[in-house]
Amino acid sequence: MITYLKKTVKNTEFRVIERFEPGCWINVTNPSEDEISFLEEAFKLDKQNLISGLDKNEVPRVEFSDSEEETYIILKMVTSTVKKELDTFLIIVTEKFFLTLSKQEPDFIKKILQGKVEFITTQKLKCLLKLFSLINKDFERSTLDVVKLVNSKRELVSDLTEKDLNLLLVQEDILNSFISAYYHSNLVYERVIKNIKFFEEDKEIIEDLMIEIQQDLNLCKSSLKTISNIRDHLIISLSNKLNKVITLLTTFTLFMTIPAALSGLYGMNVILPSQENPRFFYYLISIILVLWVIIIVFLKKKKFL
């Protein structure tokens, strides 16, 4: 779907227009092949970059047209702050308009359309900075949610269930995808500063965003380290529990083997020493107890118990 929107300094609300006008915002959501072809032909845009804006696996980058009239900025965005899913978001800046394109409409676009965010379409670079800021905020909010969840599980590491472990593995995948997005976004911002002429105060805004990205990136790495430590702790803990169980079963088997062997020996249908002695049963029990004591002392001395 292609929507033409316009808002000037004098307007308080967005005005939906039927066709293109200079200074408008072209908002494209889940376009069809025909709509992609229309955008290519009507505005002389690069079709491959338009298609890349719909590719979920596309890497964030900046590209400039041969005429340097269009700037293609591909970023990652958080499409769901609950599931922490990422998708691709394309921004195209030209002299006459700017365009946003995505497979599904993100929450920050809905906020802009609802008038919750100041957005003057005739001020293209200001709009670009605003989009950068909104994308960063969604990432930061999602990152803090993941970090908070990981830290809560760290405090209960001894009581973690299988469900908790699976949840941590999911958070690990999310953090890895965030780290990749943060890293490439920083590279995008660096190229944007170098190749687009911003006012000095606007450059400072992008530099502040880069600092925020670096801080969030460090948070993600720290949380990944925490998950790794939790995993190592659980592996060691499970290994120790397994060793204790094996030791216990081995000791129990050893204790049961001695009376079983002696009773089996004297249960055979052959003549054995002292088998006619009525007190020999008590002697046999005493021998078993002595052997048990010897085994216990030996195991404690070797620190097996």
Image (spheres, grey):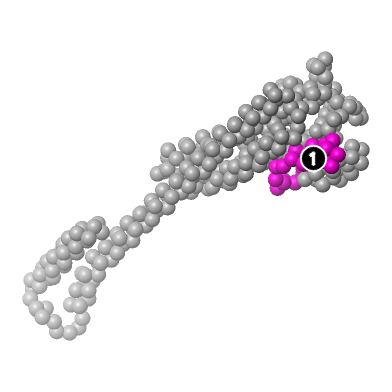
Q: Secondary structure at mark 1?
A: strand
The image quadrant that residue 259 belongs to is bottom left
Considering every residue shown, the one lying at the far top of the view is 10
Is 57 above or below relative to 271? above
Q: Is residue 232 left or right of residue 30?
A: left
The amino acid at mark 1 is Phe
Q: Residue at x 23, y 65 (%)?
A: 255
Quarter the C terminus occupies: bottom left
> Would you say residue 55 sits in the magenta stretch?
yes
Q: Position of residue 223 (x, y in %)?
A: 51, 40
Give the residue at mark 1. Answer: 64
> Would you say residue 146 sits in the magenta stretch?
no
Is 287 above or below relative to 134? below
Q: What span is in magenta?
A: 53-73
Q: Position of residue 263 (x, y in %)?
A: 20, 73
Q: Residue at x 85, y 27 (%)?
A: 24
